[in-house]
Structure formats: C-alpha cells, structure tokens
C-alpha cells in the first residue's frame, strides 16, 4: 500500500488493538431530548479532532499519555429520531465493554446517554457510587412530561443506585424541588474540603464518574446550550480531580459539548485536555 | 399605563385582532427528527425579528403589506422530546384555524411540521393539491426505520393526497428510489414553463403550498443544515411565485431556516421577505 | 381563538397585568452616542430571548422568580437619529412609572439612557443615592464636545444628585481627570469591605442602581464594544449584590450589552441571569 | 532610520504625494443616522486592509492599478454624536479636494456622507448629473421626522441637482411614495439597455457616481445591515460600469459596507475590487 | 469486540480495501507557501466530515456513489515547516498510487501540492494534458523570489508538460505577465463552447484535472483566503464537468478550501459534493 | 492639502518622529513554522487597530501614554515562504534599532520572530537575561526535524544566552523532556513570590522580555491556535509585571495573537492594553 505516514483518524495516543486496552472510548452523538439549544451530537467528533493539538505529557500529573491503554471505538451510528432504540444500543455496547473486563469512557452527546451506560455498569458493579459534576442537578422526576430526558438523568440513575450513593459538584441551577432533594440527601459538595470528606465513604467501592462540561464557568467553556455563569475554572476542576486520586473508577463519561457555541474552538480543547487528564489519572 | 410607542412583539404589519384576519401565522419551533444539523427550532423567532427590517411595500407586486389581514399567533409551546404529542398539537391548532374559516400560515421548524397542518387542511378540503418547493424530495417511505420524519413528510402527505396531486420544484438531492417515484408520477417541474403547464390542471382546486427554504441556492440561503448547491436564486423563486397568481391557496408553510448557519442574518431576511411576498400575493 | 399553549413574547415569569406589578421593565434600544463599536440597540431584545433559558428558582437567593411582580412593557420605539427626543421619551415613560407608584427597571441600550430615567426618579426621590457598577467612570464633563453622551452620563447625574451621593464599583479605565474626581469624592469602592462600609451611609435612603455590564471581566462578558480586561467575575458581582440586601432600591438599569460581540450568546445569558437575581433581591 | 521594506499603511498602489494625484480617497467612518443595524463606520478601514489582497492588474479592463494616480488621505476623525458638525467636516474636505483641481473618492460609512460631498461638487460643477446604484431609493423627504438621514440622502441631493438629473440602478425596496417619484421622473434604469439609453443624455456633462454596496445581491455582498435579496451579481455590476466608459466622472463614493455582517471578509474584498475597477476606469 | 454499528472515519462510501480501488484519495494538509490568508491545511478533514451529509445518488448524473471504487487513505502526516520534504512525501505517495495501477485523487491543502502529484503522474503518462480550473493563473515564474509556491504551480507544471498542453477555465485575476502568457498559448477557455472545442485535441490522451475551488464565485464558495468575485456558479461548474464526459482522466485534485472563511460550512459541502460528482463521472 | 483631522494610521499615541523615540515598535507578520492553527501574521495589524479603543491613562500605573516616546514603524514586508530570509530581515532591523540607541518592541507573528531580535539584542548586551512568559516552554531542540521553529525558539535563545539566564512564567504544556530541562535549570517561577526572588539575581542586568500571549488563560485570551486552559488571568499578569518595576528592560516582544480565534475582538484589546502597560512601565 502506501508507505508515507498518515494522520490517525483516532484519538491521539489511542491503542490500535481493542484487546490491549483497559479503557474503551465510545463517542455517542445523540442530542434528541435537548430542550433549549441542540448540537451536542457533533461533540465527540470535534473533541477527537482537538485531541491532535494536545501534548502527550501532563506536567500537572507528571505522566505521559502514550502509556495509557485506551481504545477509540469511534462514534456509534444512532437512529436520531428514536430515543429508546438509541438507549438500547448504548446500553448493549457498554455491556460488551464490561463483559470484556474493560472500562467504559463515553463522550457525549447529551447527558441522557449516561443512563444506559450506568445501567450496564450497575449490572456488573452492584455497589457502585456516582460522582456527578454539572451545573444542573438533573434530578427532575420528569421534564415536560417525559421520564427519560437530559434533565432527569441523574434521578433515573438514583432509581437503581440510590440517592445516598451520589456525590455532586458544581450544581448551581434548577427548580426548588431539585435543591430540596439535594439538601435531603446532602449530595452536593460545599467546596473541595467537603468533597474530600464525602469521598471518604466511597473509597473502597467502584465509582462511575459523569462530567457535564457545563460544570465549568462559561468564561472557559462557552460551548454549551445552557451556560450558567458562576461555575468552576479549569484549575478548580483539576483540583477536584486530584482529590479523587486512588479511587476505583470503573466508568467515566464527559458530555454536553455543543460546538455551535464554541466558535473559537477553546471548549473542544478544554474537553480534550480534561479527557487526557482523566485517562492519565485513572489508567 | 404607558403612553410612549412601544415596538410590537408581533410580525411587522400583523393584525392585532384574530377575528379580522384572513390568515393565521403560527410559529412551530420543532426540529426533533432532524438527522444532520439541528437548530430550526429557532427559525420562527429569528424570522419574526427580521420582519422588522422589511419595507411594507413590495415594488415587485406593487402592493402594501399594511393591507394584508394576518394574525401572528406567536410560537407554539411544544414538548420537544415527544414527536407524536407535538404533531397532535400542531394538527389541532390547524384545525381550529380552518374551523374559524381562516387560512394557515405555518413557519417552521423542520419539514415534518407540514404533515399535521396538511392533515387538518385535508379534512376541510378533500380535493386539495400540493405545491412543494424543496431541494429534497422528502419521499422516502421511512428514514432510519422511522415513518414520521422530515425526510418522509411528502410521502406521508401523498398517502392521503395522492402522488398525482403533488407538483414539485427544485428537487435536486435524494436516493434513486425517490427520483424513480418522481419520474413515475411526473411530479417535478422541469423549469418554469413546465411548472406553468402543470399548474393548469390544479387551477380550480384548493392548493396547499409548502416551501422548504433550502430550495434556494446556499449562496443566498446559507441558513440550512443541508445545503445543496445548484438551487434557485431569489429572483428565480419570485418568478415561480408570480406564475401562481390567481391560485386558490388555502394553506402555506415556510420551513427549515436553521439560524446556526446564518451568521450574517441574510437567510432570516430572505425568509421574512419571501413570507411578505407570499402574503401579498395570496391575501 | 386557539387553545394550544403559545410561547410568551414577554420576559419569562413577567406579570401580564401592569397594575399588579411592583417593577416595570422597559427596553431602551438606543445607541446613538456610541463612540467605538455600536450595536447595543439590540440588547433588550436578545436579553429577553435569553430569559427563556433561565430557571425560575435561584439557589443562591433561595427564591423563585414566579413570585416577583414585574411587568415587561417591551421596547420603546425610538427616533434613532434624534438624541434629544429619545431622551424625552425615556424620561416621560419613567415619570409615568413613578407616578403609578412602581419602580423602573431599564434595559439598555447605551449608558446615556440612564440619565433621563434618573432625572424622573430624582423628581420623586430628592434624597436619592446612586450605585454605579462600570468599567468606566463616565465622569467626563464633555466627550468630543458633547455634554450628553454615554461617556458623560454619571457626570450629568452628579449635576443634580451630587458627587458625594455616588458610590462606584469596578471602574478601571478613563482619563486622569476622571480618576482625580474619583479620588476627590472617594466614590470608588476599594474591594467589597470598603463597599460595605460605603453602603452604611445610604442605608436609609432611596437608591438607584445602574449597572454597565462591562464591569464584568470580558472573559465572562465579551458582549461589549469596550472590553476592559481585569474586571469582576460573575461570582464577584453576586457578592457585591448580596451586600446590598435590605437597601431601598427604587430604580435599576442594566445597560451596554452589544450582541455583535457575543457570538456564543453567553453574554446575553449573563445579563438575563443578573436581571433575575436583581429582581429577586429587590422585589 | 530602518532599511527593511515595511507594509504601507495606505491603500495598495496609492500615490505618496498629494500633489501628483488626480483622485483623493477619503475614508468617512460615520454611521450616526443608521436606523437598523449600525457598523458602517468600520467600513473604510476594512476595505483598505482588503486592498492588500488585490492584484494590481485588471484582466477585465486590461489596465494596471500602478498607473492610477490617487492619494489615500486616510479616514476623517469625526465627532460621532454630532451629525451636523460631521457633515460640515466632510463638505469642507471635499471643497478642498475640488479647489485643488482633484476628484473626490469617498469611502463610507453610511449613505448620508454622500450629501456634503455632492454639495461641494455641485459648487464647482453646476450642471452635474448623478448616477445612483442602490437597493433603496433613498428618496424619502424625511425619515422618522429627520430631514437628514441615510434614507433621505438622494432626495436631499435632488433638492439642488434636480430629480431629472438623477439616474438610478438596482432600486428594489422602499415605500410606495418613493416608487411613485421614481416613475414620475423615470429615474430607474430598466436593465442595461435602458441604462445605456439614459446615459446618452448626460454624456457631455460632469457626473457624480454614488454606489451603495447593497445594490449587489446579498449572496455576494452579505456585509450590509439591510440585505435585499434580488440584487445585482458582481458581473452584472461590472457590465453597468463598462457602459459608463468615457463619461466625465468628477466624483465617486462607495458606501455602506457593514463589517459585522461580513464574517468571511468577502464583502470587503468585493468593495476593494470594485474601487480598483472604478479608479482604473475613470482615471 | 463491539457489535453496534459505528460511524466510519473515512469518506462516505469509501472502499475499505486498497486493492479493490480504482482511485486513491489522499488528504494533503499543507499550506506553507500561502501568502495571504492561510488555513487550507484543515481542508481535507472538513471536507471528509461534510461528505457524511451527502446523498450517495446523483440525480444530475443518475449514478450512485456506492458503486464507485475509491479508497480513502486519510491525510498525510507532513512536516509543516519544511516545504521540500513535504513535496517529496507527496510525490512518493503519488508514485506508489500509480505503481499500483490506480488513479490519484488529492485533496488540498494549497495548490502547490498539485506539483509533486503531477510529477509522479507525468513519470507514468508522458503525453499528459492538464485541465486547470482556478480564479488565478498560477503562472508566475517566481513569487516573492520563490520558484515553488502556490502562485507558481501551473508554471512549474508547464516546465515539463508544456504550456500548449494546458487548458484553463475561470482565470480572472493575476498580473499582466500571466495574462500575456495565457494569450500567447491560448490556454484560457472563453466560455463553455470554446472549452468544448479545446477538449477535442486532448480526447485521446491521459488527462490530469486540477481544481482550485476559488474558481467558484465567492457567493457560493466563501471558504477561500483569496475571494475573487465574478466566478462560476456551481451549476456552471457542473456544466463544464459534463463536457468532459468520456475523457481519460488519470489524476484529479481539488484544493484550497480554507475553513476559517467558511463559517456556515457551505463551502465544505460544495467541495464534498463536487468530489462526489467527479468520482461518479470518472470512475 | 487637507485641513480636517484624520485618524492616524499608527498606534495610538505613537511619536511621529523616529529620532525622538526611546522605543521602536515593529510589527512582524510571520507565521511560517506554525504547526497547528496558523494566522498570527494578522496579529500586528489587528492589535494596532485595537489600540484606538484604549484610554491613554492607566489607573493601575497612574501614568499617561501620551508621555511615552515610542515610534510605530509599521509592519515588515516579509517573504512568507522563506523562513531564513525572514529571520535575516528581522535581525537586521533590530540591529538598526539598537545601533540607534533605541529599544526594540516587536509585535508578532509567531514566537520564532523573537530569535533574531534577541540575537541583535545580544550583540549589544552580552550579559542579557531573558524573561519568558508562555504556556509552552519552547525548549525543544528540534520540532519535526526543524531546529528553527516556534516550538524551539527559547532553546535556540538559550544556545547563546544560557539556560541559567532565563526565567519563565506560566509554562504548563510540553513534552517531559522540556520539563526535565526546566527542573534542571530551575527556570520556572513557582508563583509570584518565587518570581520576585528569581528577579533578584538579574536586577542589575539588561533584560529582554518576551511574552507569548497564550500565557493567559483562554477564558480571557481565546485568540490563539494553541489554547491551554489553566493559565493566568489578566490581573495575574499585571501583578507579575508590577514585580518587574525598576528592571532595565532593553527589548520586548508580544507574540502569537491569532485573530481567527478572536471573534469578539477581546484578545486584540487584551494585547493592546498589555502593550500600553508595558510601555508605561518601562519607558
């Protein structure tokens, strides 16, 4: 064939071989329940392209991405108009990942894509705890009459995981009913010290980490349909991550980049760099 | 209250009183089945804002918009995640318009919103003919397994109107199966003379006109998720419209402006000016 | 008429009835004296649209916007080329608001629109104090020979209110002569503690609050023709507001969003959320 | 000083020496009466920058720009808030140009800047005829009560030049009253043949040419606050220009580029290339 | 591994197997000699993404893309700062394609990438003719002292192919010296009839077709650093292509999409659709 | 000639006379080795335009820009495709500046432009120390095989200045080998106190200050091809500058603004304001 080097069509530093990988990265280009400004379906593609501007080495963690074993499966080919079938495909794919004794790394797409992945994860790890970074609680019981929505996803997760097994960071927007639930179950970390304390009780358990990128302040992450000023800086977010060192993370997703609102491309770079740090930290 | 003049929140020149109106304009901010680049839900709002840059007089038609009796009902409040309920709301609203002996002017949103409006129209006018301007035939029987989609809408319309009662303009993209149907039923106008000839056979019947704005060339209409180079210029489109003078148009919709791809705002102005010309022509 | 729910064309949660309202919100789409990058005339419209992405509940204040009684009068229809007539219309409208025993909430437009509103306010409240958030002092006596300009507005206000009754926050740009005035009258708060101390002396008086949105850092508020790096974060601004709890605020305006420089729409959301917090705090 | 070549800060191919020049190019960054979407004050600067992407040779005219003697005076420093003083400065500058036996080449800015230049021109050439390319007639007697506005400029010109000495091209938007005037005086060219015929009667007279760039279709010129679909292509416009070969053009202006709506920069290039062709044609 | 369908990372309808292919598509992300507005290095990637919005069927040609045998090799990994090494890599890759008895389909990148591909092609086909679509002649002997540049590429090609074997379409910008060459060798088609006549003399020879996308008018193709108004419409370009039916095309490239100036994404779609038509026509 | 005031085509407050100036500002529009997202060649021009929105007075420094004696030479006219010749031109120009006993103020362009300027500076000041603000260490020995690149520039500088004479601020991205060098020579300031301590040892020496603008966080500076979240705020950067009061700065450059990614124009304003503060501080 051709002898010249070609640019990989995968994530930078991804492993070519599925069997070698500890983590399987799956793009999930779905935004079918988005209520306000859609477009997250283009997120996985743009983040993958942005990965090619990253250095492989992280000076913060003093580790090199070249030694992380992750496989980039690409993006699922989903029937956009059919929410239930889409959720089935995601769930089945996540089950295959867990059946192969690997860890799931989903890249959204809207936040609802977390639900089927966590269902698959829960089938394997019954005592799972959930770490949830987000500007929004996503704890509504229904949204405009729908039980399955980006705005209800953590509530649906709580149906099988239990509210007492969820720790939240950065929540700053939602109806009063959600904040009543947050108070009742004391899910929300009040700063990094409280976060650290809350982590104590889950340190011996498998943990699923879900990050809605709008947990970041829109100054550093404009690429969202639902900007909420008053969020974390990138440095804040890294500090939270470093607190999690040593946790047994068995699944991760990073969701809700909406490229329409990321005209400078900074948000895609932020997402890509965050994902590199996550894989370095939990490899 | 306040005595100063305030800017109307309605379309320019809209009638304040529903009862006085011949036409009822309804914004339909729905894009739930969009397969490629969503965002048409913001179309009706942006077109209404653009209407305030229009002159009321049309030198092409030598008529003034101030003398058109149309009521701007605003935008429907729709449950985005629920396609079937959305279609019901549109259909019921269109039925109310026809029950009040008025004409329907829908502003999309994606093209699927034409289906319920035309169903309501068909319940009143059984011998209806359909004029369809579009870059795409929208004649698939299903799209990714779905029967109800922006890509199947004219096929669904043909189920009750009949392929032989459809005239198409500007179609230039689609799978072979759609073009086979087009040839079989000879629906597509081969230029303006053929269009004029095709109009002959429907001139004594009620007609529903549906315009997907991507029938225009992307040079003048970039505001679409599915640009198809090789389309009509604005002057071409006006010439087609002028051929329709005297037809008994009983329903119109103008759909598929996607503001994400209209960074200069020209597409919204094009849509607004087209709507003014349509209302002037068929008042 | 039509039975389906339609999207309101007013601000989210606005009261339908003028008489019920404590606050009257008036959009003032004027930018006629803008010296550098015009476009604030589109501010009120874009902020109103952004209000529809807000939650009604504020977790920071633990209050719900649904219980605020404010009336959205819409945008004044102004003669753009005629500054003096424009100022008259604004002043008369504000006088009507105060005559009805309601409070004025202006949304600019450029900062000059504050002057006529504050003149009307002063006619009712002779002992008024002024809180002024801005990157620029706006204390020039004239600007390119003009006495009435966005760059002279607080100086003109001081003509009847008195420099000693003005407290400023965030000022960080201007000619030396303005900073000499600031020092002479000690108007500028040196951090939040100094702000708190300065508030002591006005706590029993009626207060007019005017916020030029460029007081925020351009990282979180790019939507301005005059970005001044080194400003407040959104969290900083909320902290200043919370210090003001219990003040007798009788008039507010929020000015200078320039949508041309807000391509991601974050600035409009920032403005809308700020306005929600202000109305919750001072209802 | 410094021996390296530096990029000129003037228009490409401009003459360094005022005295040598036949034409004097003056940028007029004024948009104070703009009613809809302001921003044309940045036009002259952006067009000058775009000039540096031009070739000096025109294959259409087979002439080279290096042999045109024009002086680029730069942009006037204008008091934005003061319309009357602005008009005085422009008029005086134009008078100085004509007093020096040179020709005026104005670059707007909004269309009102044509008025003082043409007044100065008229003081020298009493039998002047006017060629006016525009989407809008600009023949209102007043606009929102103002006699001096971008929307009244040709009417004001007609006050001293006479309607019968005006030839118009491309007009396609305005109130009925303006089109009544157009018909009464038969000012509007009905295609290029009619234009050619109309030129016959002015071929022995001094002519002032004013081009509002929105005469072009927004497909090729999106950089305008008032896009009017249905306009000229660039090739159409060149054809009109070529008809004018041999006319005694004594003043030109090119106005109304609004860079906010020219995100790709194509409109600025179109304006710059048009200006090169004009100077080549009428040198 | 994983059983769900994934989105291909290749061009739509590309053959998975190199050996089966007639054509080999190679992305060449190089823009190192670009003089004015760089960015074409991102062209191949953006065009590949846009390919996924295409239908596989072309109604103009009545052929289906699924039956074209082309292999998408992806993008070459090039040393940006080193022009000569970059050219070597391209040339060697093209030689391998020709050695495998396949045809080269390059996607630029800047126009200089045509040179090494055509050198490789010429080594195999000594009697090659060249069809060159472009706004610019690219016939300079040097550009700012450089012999190898995007502005000299066709001159360099003529060094071994001979000026008399080059046919040009759409050239409308350049210095006089280039147009003198064009006239001397009569390379430029004066409209489609002249093109057809010129094709007569090369109909029995191998032909290399190179298309600089700026041959299109910037109204339909804004995505270029060097917009030249007055170009071809998309329909014009298709008409030229259809004239070429039956030619023995042995190499093609499509170059100079600059995504920075394609904010709506229309230019990328135009490029992708053109490439589909080319592969359908010359499969 | 013309008596009206014209807008200067130079930087705001620049001295007209070369001989009077202490500083000579030279724009260097070169981006030929940029590996990822080019476009910095337009930086100097855009920063100069942004300078016209600045106040002349700095309240932070309590100094006025009108009293700074700097000459704006404009932008070098460079052969883009020829790196070595470009570097020669820059070096010779800087030598002329130093020969005239003035100080060099370069505005990039990519970071490689620092090398020839610092070579010229070193020829005059043999004991020079270097202050380097950047997100990237730029300490690679080669980049994709090239010794002279934006990614190797500080390494090349260290070849003659010595690693021990370099102090770095803000570095947060690069391969491990670069961070090994940083540790070995302890070049990187660990916060402002460490910076202050490091400055002690160079306070009696001539110092060259080079600022890659991406040292700022992308929240306040999106205008870069290589955004690195986690950087300095503008206030942070000013604090570092103030620590440098009293240093003997003999050369400065500010590089890497890439206007393609600065859609709101905030980054250009940030760069312009930083340059004003630098000239005020080191005049």
Image (spheres, coloured by chain):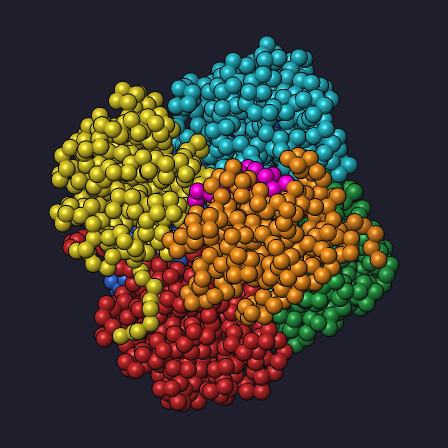
Chain colours: A green, B cyan, C blue, D yellow, E orange, F red
Residue B125, relative to residue E237: is it above or below? above
Q: Residue at x 41, y 40 (%)?
A: D234
* In front of the other: D186 or A270: D186
Q: Work out whether residue F126 can be spotted.
A: yes
Residue B69, relative to residue E97: is it above or below? above
* Horizontal arrangement in the rendering, residue B192 relative to residue F22 (left or right): right
Q: Residue at x 43, y 24 (%)?
A: B13
Q: Residue at x 18, y 34 (%)?
A: D205
* Horizontal arrangement in the rendering, residue C71 relative to residue C33 (left or right): right
Res. C141 image quadrant? bottom left
Q: Position of residue E16 (x, y in %)?
A: 77, 53
* In front of the other: B161 or E249: E249
Q: Position of residue C152 (x, y in %)?
A: 27, 52
Residue C272, relative to residue A144: is it above or below? below
Instruction: Locate the N terminus of chain A and report the quarter of the image it occupies.
Output: bottom right
Verify whether residue E241 appears in magenta: yes
Q: Position of residue E120 (x, y in %)?
A: 63, 61
* In front of the other: B14 or D254: D254
Q: Residue at x 22, y 36 (%)?
A: D207
Instruction: Locate the C terminus of chain A and report the quarter of the image it occupies.
Output: bottom right
Q: Work out whether residue A148 can be spotted.
A: no
Res. A81 image quadrant? top right
Q: Position of residue B108 (x, y in %)?
A: 58, 31
Q: Which residues are magenta?
A: E226-245
* In front of the other: E50 or A233: E50
Res. C3 image quadrant? top right
Verify whether residue F162 appears in magenta: no
């Amino acid at each position: 064939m051709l002898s010249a080097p070609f640019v990989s069509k995968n994530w930078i530093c991804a492993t070519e071989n599925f069997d070698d990988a500890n983590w399987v990265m799956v793009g999930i280009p779905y935004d079918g329940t988005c209520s306000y400004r859609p477009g997250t379906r283009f997120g996985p593609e743009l983040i993958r392209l942005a990965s090619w501007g990253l250095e492989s080495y992280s000076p913060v963690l003093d580790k090199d991405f070249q030694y992380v074993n992750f496989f980039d499966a690409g993006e699922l080919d989903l029937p956009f108009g059919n929410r239930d079938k889409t959720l089935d495909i995601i769930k089945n794919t996540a089950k295959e990942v867990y059946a192969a004794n690997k860890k799931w790394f989903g890249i959204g797409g809207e936040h609802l894509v977390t639900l089927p992945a966590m269902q698959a994860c829960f089938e394997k790890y019954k005592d799972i705890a959930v770490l949830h970074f987000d500007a929004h609680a996503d704890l509504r019981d229904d949204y405009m009459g729908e039980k399955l929505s980006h705005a209800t996803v953590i509530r649906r997760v709580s149906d099988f995981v239990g509210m007492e097994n969820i720790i939240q960071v950065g929540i700053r927007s939602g109806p009063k009913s959600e904040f009543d639930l947050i108070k009742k179950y004391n899910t929300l970390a009040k700063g990094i010290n409280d976060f650290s304390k809350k982590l104590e009780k889950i340190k011996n358990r498998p943990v699923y980490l879900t990050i809605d990128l709008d947990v970041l302040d829109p100054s550093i992450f404009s690429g969202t349909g639902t900007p909420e000023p008053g969020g974390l800086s990138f440095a804040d977010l890294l500090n939270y991550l470093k607190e999690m060192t040593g946790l047994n993370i068995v699944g991760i997703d990073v969701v809700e980049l909406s490229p329409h609102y990321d005209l400078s491309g900074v948000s895609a770079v932020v997402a890509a760099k965050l994902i590199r740090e996550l894989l370095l930290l939990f490899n």
